[in-house]
Each structure stands twice: as structure tokens, then as C-alpha cells.
């Protein structure tokens, strides 16, 4: 199992949700900060893997997965609406599992990027999920 496998599982979990805003999560070939359309984008992609010995014969593998949420703010959507949506996604993923890997934590990397709002009128938020499997 790899971080990208976990990302694919998270995409499935997110796409099964009913949320306040309609979206379709995807695992991009190359993540992009700039939006090509005004639509809401939820990109989910593998970021890395950490391994740690937990006993003589067991290793904990942490899979790190980024969730990048972007949307143009031209249509009247506010930063407050989007940050509430991101919180909704985070809450829905708590205590989830992908295969044998179990959610451990969520790190907010960028709550919202002020420079993207100012320069591109775009909301951008990035959070990182940590899933753990023991081998």
C-alpha cells in the first residue's frame, strides 16, 4: 500500500459524502493551485510515507495525504463559507479507515491563503491526513 492508494481511498470516502457544497474529489496527476474554472475543486493526493519500528517484528507505516480545496470567489462565495466547508470535510474523515490503514490525525497546512484571495480572488486551503497501518 502507498500514500497514493490511501489518497484514492480518501477520494472514495469524500465522494460518498453529502455536504453543504456539491463537489467531486479526485486524485490529480499533478496537483494545481490555480483553478481553470470557477468550480469547487477537492484534490486528494499522496504526500509521503513515514516508517517507525514499534516492536521487534512490527513496523508502523504512516501514509500522508494532502487534501487541497480551491474555489474562485467571483460568484459571491465567501471565505467563511469555504472554511466551514473545509471543517465539514475534516470532521467527516475523522476515525475513518482505508483498507487496514486507520486515520491518526489531521494537520492544517494552510487554513486559507490570503495571497490567493488577494491576487486571484481564489480560496485555497490545504490539510494533511495521516493514516497508519502496522506491518
Image: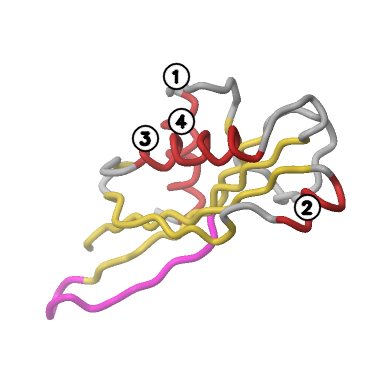
**Which residue lies at the image location 36% right of the left edge and 39% below the top edge?**
91
The image's mark for residue 92 is 3
Give the quadrant of the C terminus. bottom left
* Residue identified by numbered label 4: 12
Query: Distance of mark 3 from mark 2, alpha carbons?
Result: 26 Å
**Which residue lies at the image location 42% right of the left edge and 54% below the top edge?**
129
Query: Distance of mark 4 from mark 1, alpha carbons?
Result: 12 Å
- Expressed as whole percent of the image width and height from the top left, the position of residue 21 reads 57, 23
**Dot 2 alpha-carbon crowd within 10 angstroms: few under 14, some 14 to 19, many 20 or more:** some
Instruction: Say whether disc 2 or disc 1 marks the residue closer to the N-terminus.
Output: 1
Query: Distance of mark 3 from mark 1, alpha carbons?
Result: 10 Å
* Residue identified by numbered label 2: 116
Instruction: Kindly check if marks 3 and 2 are in contact, taking CB atoms under 8 A apart as contact.
Output: no
Is residue 81 one of those drawn in magenta?
no
**Dot 3 alpha-carbon crowd within 10 angstroms: few under 14, some 14 to 19, many 20 or more:** some
Instruction: Single out the mark in the foreground, 2 or 4.
Output: 2
Instruction: Say whether disc 3 or disc 2 marks the residue closer to the N-terminus.
Output: 3
Residue 133 found in image quarter: bottom left
Q: Is residue 64 left or right of residue 93?
A: right
Instruction: Single out the mark in the foreground, 2 or 1.
Output: 2
Query: Distance of mark 2 from mark 1, alpha carbons?
Result: 27 Å
Helix, strand, or loop for circle 3? Answer: helix
Instruction: Kindly check if marks 3 and 4 are in contact, taking CB atoms under 8 A apart as contact.
Output: no
* Residue identified by numbered label 1: 18
Instruction: Single out the mark in the foreground, 3 or 2.
Output: 2
Amino acid at each position: 500500500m502507498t500514500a497514493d492508494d490511501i489518497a484514492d481511498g480518501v477520494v472514495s470516502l469524500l465522494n460518498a459524502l453529502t455536504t453543504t457544497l456539491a463537489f467531486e474529489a479526485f486524485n490529480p496527476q499533478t496537483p494545481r493551485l490555480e483553478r481553470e474554472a470557477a468550480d469547487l475543486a477537492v484534490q486528494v493526493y499522496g504526500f509521503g510515507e513515514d516508517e517507525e519500528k514499534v516492536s521487534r517484528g512490527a513496523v508502523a507505516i504512516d501514509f500522508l495525504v494532502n487534501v487541497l480545496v480551491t474555489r474562485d470567489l467571483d460568484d459571491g462565495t465567501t471565505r467563511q463559507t469555504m472554511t466551514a466547508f473545509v471543517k465539514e470535510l475534516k470532521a467527516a474523515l475523522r476515525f475513518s479507515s482505508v483498507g487496514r490503514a486507520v486515520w491518526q490525525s489531521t494537520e492544517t497546512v494552510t487554513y486559507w491563503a490570503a495571497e490567493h484571495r488577494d491576487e486571484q480572488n481564489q480560496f485555497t486551503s490545504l490539510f494533511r491526513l495521516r493514516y497508519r497501518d502496522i506491518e
